[in-house]
Image (tube, rainbow, N blue to C red):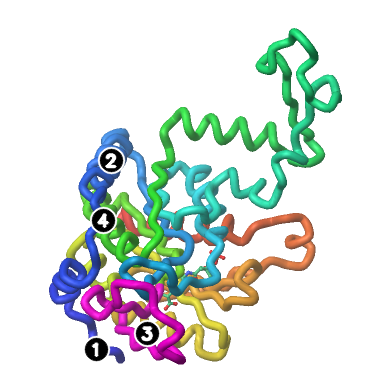
Amino acid sequence: MMAEPRASSIDGKLAEEFAVPSHVEEVKERMTAFVQRHGAAGGRVVLITSGGTKVPLESRTVRFLDNFSSGRRGAVSAEHFIDSGYAVVFLHRHRSLCPYTRMFSTVNLLDALQFRDGGGGAASEGSAAEEEVVVVSQQALPNVAKVLRRYQEVKEAGLVLPIEFSTLSEYLHLLKAAAQALSTIGSKAMFYLAAAVSDFYIPASDMPEHKIQSSNGPLQISMKMVPKILSPLVKDWAPQAFVTSFKLETDPAILLDKARRALDTYRHQAVVANVLDTRRGYVVVVTPDAKHELVLTEQEVEEDVEIEERIVSNLTSAHTHFISQ
Ligand code: 9Z3
């Protein structure tokens, strides 16, 4: 078994080696108010992390390391958590997919809009441009009315608090702040850590200030291991919460073993294990005493069934059981 990381030393490292974003206290206050409002009404709150992190190579950053994550898993899951009665703190990478708007992320907006009179849009002489009415083509944006209605209901009820990050440092500090905010509602809090977080970084003290010069020849970089943030989260920051982490591999042969090892090491409640190429249609939810394989059939894929609906249903049931204990 892996040696268990010491939570308090990780906390110290976070303060020393990762620049604290200037807005972290303000965001923490907003998160705390959001959690307490829903907590006071007896509701559950899930913190979803989503998208990839950016790891700078220079302090005045020209270049950085990034990864594949689109944020789709987090965005789709947020919608299903809301449908299951949760309020959502959506900690996501700037410009990654967001709940509801994700359905239209590949549409060219200008191709989906038309002037109501079908004309070319040039304001006729004497008519004010603001009188022109632009309408949406339902063909270009399928289901747009239904999605818009749901989006507005959710917004009006204040069920989602979107918070953005870009860099690894922002992610780590905002996650800590979010964990402390969620800890105020004890076991009614859930963590759903679907973001693809870098395992490697360059500490600020080792980073060149200015753009790395190609005239110096081929580049060799040495990166440090990012501290295992799950450790202080489970032990110190939100010890009563239901915590789900994600395990991603490209080799299916090692996936389940790695998921089990993560559970043994951090002693949290669930790991969602997935393989890069098959992640939209197959995942395994691993808990300390069970393993649930969730699979979409070909027909379900054709019918646009989304596997996140099953993941969320599985985890919300486990959370109910966890709260009752
Ligand atoms: C996941 O495994 C997510 O399911 C994906 C979703 C990132 C694959 P998309 O955003 O993809 O819908 O395109 N997230 C966690 C990935 C990760 O980096 N896990 C680490 C690990 O496996 C740390 S917990 O070691």
Residue mark closest to the camera, 3 vs 4: 4
Q: Position of residue 104 (x, y in %)?
A: 66, 46
Q: Amino acid at mark 2?
A: Arg
Up the image or down, 110 lies above or below 254; here it is above
Query: Identity of the amino acid at label 4?
Result: Pro
**Rendering quarter of residue 20:** bottom left
* x and y percentages locating residue 122 in the rendered image: 78, 23
Q: Is mark 3 within 8 Å of ligand 1?
A: no
User: For the C terminus, which image quadrant?
Assistant: bottom left
Instruction: Check if mark 4's residue and mark 2's residue have beta carbons within 8 Å.
Output: no
- Closer to the chain start, of discs 1 and 4, is 1
Write down the region rendered in magenta.
198-225
Q: Earlier in the sequence, mark 2 or mark 1?
A: 1
Q: Residues within 10 Å of mark 1 (few under 14, many from 20)?
A: few
Left-right relation of 205 to 109: left
Q: Quadrant of residue 109?
A: top right
- Residue 166, disc: none
Helix, strand, or loop for circle 3?
helix
Which label's residue is closer to the chain start, 3 or 4?
A: 4
| Residue 226 found in image quarter | bottom left
Mark 4, residue position = 21
**Can you tell which of label 4 and label 2 is closer to the viewer?**
4
Given residues 135 and 119, the one toward you in this image is 119
**Residue tagged by mark 2?**
30
Kind of element beneath mark 1: loop
Tell me whether the residue at label 1 lies in contact with that at label 4, contact meaning CB atoms closer than 8 angstroms.
no
